Structures are given as C-alpha cells and as structure tokens.
Image (cartoon, rainbow, N blue to C red):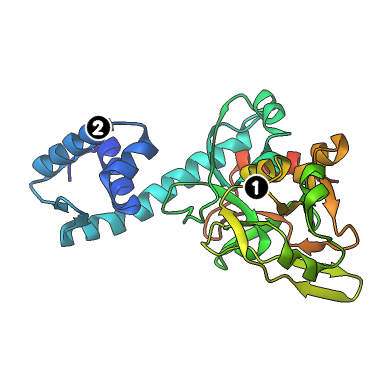
Amino acid sequence: MGRLTRGDLGDLNMFRQIAESGGFRKAAALLDVSPSALSHAMRGLEARQGVRLFNRTNRAVTLTPAGVELLARLDTGFNEIELGLEQLNRYRDRPAGQLRLNVFSDAARLVLAPILAEYSNTYPDVRTEVMVQDRVVDIVNEGFDAGIRYGGLVPEDMIAIPLGPELRWIAVASPAYLQSAPRLETPSDLAEHKCIGIRMGNGQIYRWELERGDEADVVAVDWVMVVNETVMTIELAETGGGVAYCLEQRVTRQLADGSLVRVLPAWSSMGPAFHLYYPSRRQLPEALRALLRLIQARSE
C-alpha cells in the first residue's frame, strides 16, 4: 500500500463530507469551497483509485458499494484523527480550532449574544461559527459540534446540559391595540382577540399554555396570523397587530419602555430551559467546554 499524500487526505476528507451531508452543495458549504471544485476533486480521486465512488444523477448523489465500504473505513480513521487533535487542546494554554454551533433564535439572543464577544477575546485561537436556525436539524449530518434548543426538543441520543432555570412565557400586546380591543380578563377571552401564533422548528404551532396557581388553561384560538420567528412576533405586537405569546426575557426592554404590556398578568407558563447538546459518542471539545463555562457563570 502506497503512502498517503497531503492531497489524498484532503480528498478523502472531502469524500467523507459529501457522503455524510448527502450532496456536493451541502459539503461545499461546510468546507467553504465551490461545488465545482469539490466535484473536480472527487473525479480526480476516482481516477487515481480506478474505482467509481459516487452514482451521480441530476437529482441525487449516492454511494456505490465501493464508496459505502470506503466511508465505513474513513469514519473510524478520521474520528480517531479528530479525537487526537482535540486531545492536544489539553496541552495548550487555551483551546484552538473551529467550533460550529446550531442555535435557534431565542437562545442566540438570550444565551450567546451576551457572551460571544468575551468568548472570542478570551479564546482568540477558536474560530466560532454560529448558525441561527429555528428549523430542527441533525447537527451530526450538518457538521455542527453542538446545538442549543429548548429541553423538550433535544434528540434522545444526545448529551444535553441545561443552561439555566426553566423559562417563563407570557402574553403581551401594545397599549394602542388594547385601547380598542375587547375585554381581556381571563384566558377564554383570548378567543375574541387577534392572536399571533408562532410555528416552531418542528413544524408545529406552539400552544399557548397559561397557568395561575393550580389552574391551567390551554388556549384555543383562531390565529389572525402565524409566523416562524420570535422577532417578527414581537414586532407585530408592538405595532398593534394583536396579542403575542413569548419568553418574558425577550420583551424585557419593551415592557420597561411601555411599548408592550403584559395581558392577563396573573397568568403565565413555565417551560423547559435552554439546553446545549452534542453527540453522545463524541468527547466534549475543549472549545465547547470553555463556552459552556462562560454561559453557566453568567446564569448563576
């Protein structure tokens, strides 16, 4: 067996990324190269090896039997290489490398935004990439080191670490909307109001659950509109679009300056905390461990 060159290792890693991500475009985005350059490299690899690794059609790219067998071998080898490089961080004064996170918008604003500048200044050798995405994704197949979601949305095969206490959900509206709106004294009154629904990353519309002491009420309303972004939900409420249901922490400023007020102030709901999660088969990278320490210190 001939010795591997630097080019061979690079091409084999490209092959692995294409196979695991399911296509040239996704892999090209992960590797920060063009799809055409990736395709050219794979044709070169196939030519040198004398074996076809991909079945290519206009709609899909799949592995040949030879490609499937090669991927199984490479997974073991590259996982060991990545583990070896990660363990070097234990001998450095501070972690280095790349950290890729997939985070939904509420956690991006409330958890990461307040500490990322400090993290970058403290660990300048870590290149951090954050994908803010409310759609639930497979972080392993998409090439992320970790994700942040609500506790109830973390896949069962992941290691999940809570990032703070449970979160309070409240209903809010603008003073201008409430001036001409029907009375709003009990959760059942919401049926007469313009309510702004929010569609979650798993495709479901979030149900409004309101509690007061031992009382609990799941609100049934006809949504005047449905959006899939918290920021837009809040902005619609601020401009008189109706009643919104969101995390209390997301509207701290608006409640303070009066652009929004709580409706049904005696009613709210506690939901799962933010959780950072990562694959159970992987060791916690030192760069991620350092980020976790900063987040936990801020939440204490």
Position of residue 178 measured from the top left corner of the image (x, y, whole percent)? 81, 50
Disc 2 to disc 1: CB gap under 8 Å: no
Name the kind of residue labelled 2 in the image.
Gly
**View extreme (front): residue:** 180
- Residue at horizontal 84%, vertical 60%? 183
- Residue at horizontal 79%, vertical 46%? 249
- Residue at horizontal 62%, vertical 43%? 232
Q: Distance between the residues labelled 2 and 1?
A: 49 Å
- Residue at horizontal 79%, vertical 56%? 170
Pointer 1: residues within 10 angstroms few (<14), some, or many (20+)?
Answer: many
Q: In this view, does 31 lie to the left or right of 37?
A: right
Q: Nearer the viewer, residue 189 or 217?
A: 189
Q: Is residue 126 above or below residue 1?
A: above
Position of residue 110 measured from the top left corner of the image (x, y, whole percent)? 72, 42
Q: Is residue 176 above or below residue 265?
A: above
Task: Give the label, 2 or 1, closer to the camera.
Answer: 1
Position of residue 14 measured from the top left corner of the image (x, y, whole percent)? 29, 41
User: In the image, which disc is placed on residue 233?
Assistant: 1
Q: Can residue 219 be seen in this view?
A: yes
Q: In this view, does 123 lie above or below 273?
A: above
Check disc 2 and report the residue beneath it: 7
Where residue 7 sits, quadrant-wise, is top left
Q: Nearer the viewer, residue 193 or 147?
A: 193
Position of residue 300 measured from the top left corner of the image (x, y, whole percent)? 86, 46
Name the kind of residue labelled 1 in the image.
Thr
Assign a secondary structure to mark 1.
helix
Where residue 298 sits, quadrant-wise, is top right
Q: Is residue 65 above or below residue 123?
A: below
Assign a secondary structure to mark 2.
helix
